[in-house]
Image (cartoon, grey):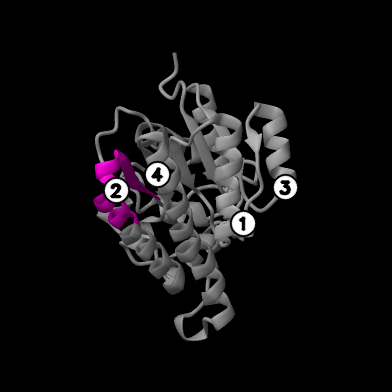
């Protein structure tokens, strides 16, 4: 019997092949969970569901009404929600003085407001189920510096603090809330930024010698979701030790890319 047998998991941010949300969903399915994958892209969700047997329910995390509909549809189909994973993501690079109001609003809409709405709704569902586990995918840069990421860093730090509040407030309902914080990870979100030399620049700062993979994220999420995890309000830094050091600077990244002949 799998470690998540008889558990129902909702994972939002699972629309793109190879991303963290889909990697977590696959791992949960392999461990016996009933999994609902969600996000804004219907095609990606349907393709994943057809391949794995998960249930696909589209949802925009920035809309509380849509999250409520997601929770309602999940409970109607599976009877309960035991695990809720927020892997929704958005990011941009911009010099601090050049960040626009539109960019900042879009970042806060997904990461801050969306994260808050998601936890509000999932806490309500988990109280009915007698407890559960909430996992927010954050980032190492909520705690360590990275060039040209101010709004992203601030939004993720806020998400972390809200998660700790939920852990503090709802432990009495047997609800755990934890933060999973990766370093740079090879996902579709990295996209065109993944050029020769970039990964190497980051890997040099990782004591374990390589950057994070989606499999690393899925492995950590499995423990956090399971009944083995007697932890709440904690940050799981899945970074190969990056938080012991620092991210490379823009100048170091550009030098590494140049050395790679790009």
Identify the disc placed on residue 170: 2
Instruction: Mark yes or no: residue 88 visible.
Output: yes
Badge 1 vs badge 3, beta-carbon distance below 8 Å: no
Image spot of residue 125 (x, y percent) = 45, 43
Badge 1 vs badge 4, beta-carbon distance below 8 Å: no
Identify the disc placed on residue 180: none
Q: Earlier in the sequence, mark 3 or mark 4?
A: 3
Identify the disc placed on residue 134: 4
Report which residue position mark 1 lands on.
60
Please tell me whether mark 3 or mark 2 is closer to you in this view: 2
Q: Is residue 215 above or below residue 169?
A: above
Q: Earlier in the sequence, mark 1 or mark 4?
A: 1
Q: Which residues are magenta?
A: 163-181
Please tell me whether mark 2 or mark 4 is closer to you in this view: 2
| 149 within the magenta span | no
Q: Is residue 106 left or right of residue 179?
A: right
Q: CA distance from mark 2 to mark 4?
A: 11 Å
Badge 4 local density, few (<14 within 10 Å), some, or many (20+)? Answer: many
Report which residue position mark 3 lands on.
42
Q: Earlier in the sequence, mark 1 or mark 3?
A: 3
């Amino acid at each position: 019997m799998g470690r998540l047998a008889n558990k129902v998991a909702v994972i939002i941010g699972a629309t793109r092949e190879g991303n963290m949300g889909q990697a977590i969903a696959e791992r949960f399915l392999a461990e016996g969970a009933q999994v609902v994958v969600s996000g804004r892209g219907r095609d990606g969700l349907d393709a994943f569901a057809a391949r794995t047997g998960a249930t696909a329910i589209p949802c925009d995390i920035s809309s509380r009404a849509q999250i409520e509909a997601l929770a309602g549809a999940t409970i109607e189909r599976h009877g309960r929600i035991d695990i809720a994973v927020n892997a929704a993501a958005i990011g941009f690079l911009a010099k601090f003085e050049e960040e626009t109001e539109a960019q900042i609003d879009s970042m806060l809409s997904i990461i801050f407001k969306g994260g808050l709405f998601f936890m509000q709704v999932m806490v309500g569902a988990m109280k009915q189920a007698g407890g559960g586990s909430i996992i927010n995918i954050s980032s190492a840069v909520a705690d360590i510096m990275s060039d040209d990421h101010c709004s992203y860093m601030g939004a993720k730090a806020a998400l972390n603090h809200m998660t700790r509040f939920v852990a503090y407030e709802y432990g009495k309902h047997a609800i755990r809330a934890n933060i999973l914080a990766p370093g740079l990870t090879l996902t579709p979100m990295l996209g065109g930024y993944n050029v020769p030399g970039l990964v190497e620049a980051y890997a040099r700062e990782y004591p374990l010698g390589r950057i994070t993979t989606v499999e690393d994220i899925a492995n950590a999420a499995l423990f956090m979701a399971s009944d083995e995890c007697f932890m709440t309000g904690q940050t799981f830094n899945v970074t190969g030790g990056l938080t012991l050091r620092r991210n490379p600077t823009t100048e170091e990244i550009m030098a590494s890319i140049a050395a790679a002949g790009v």
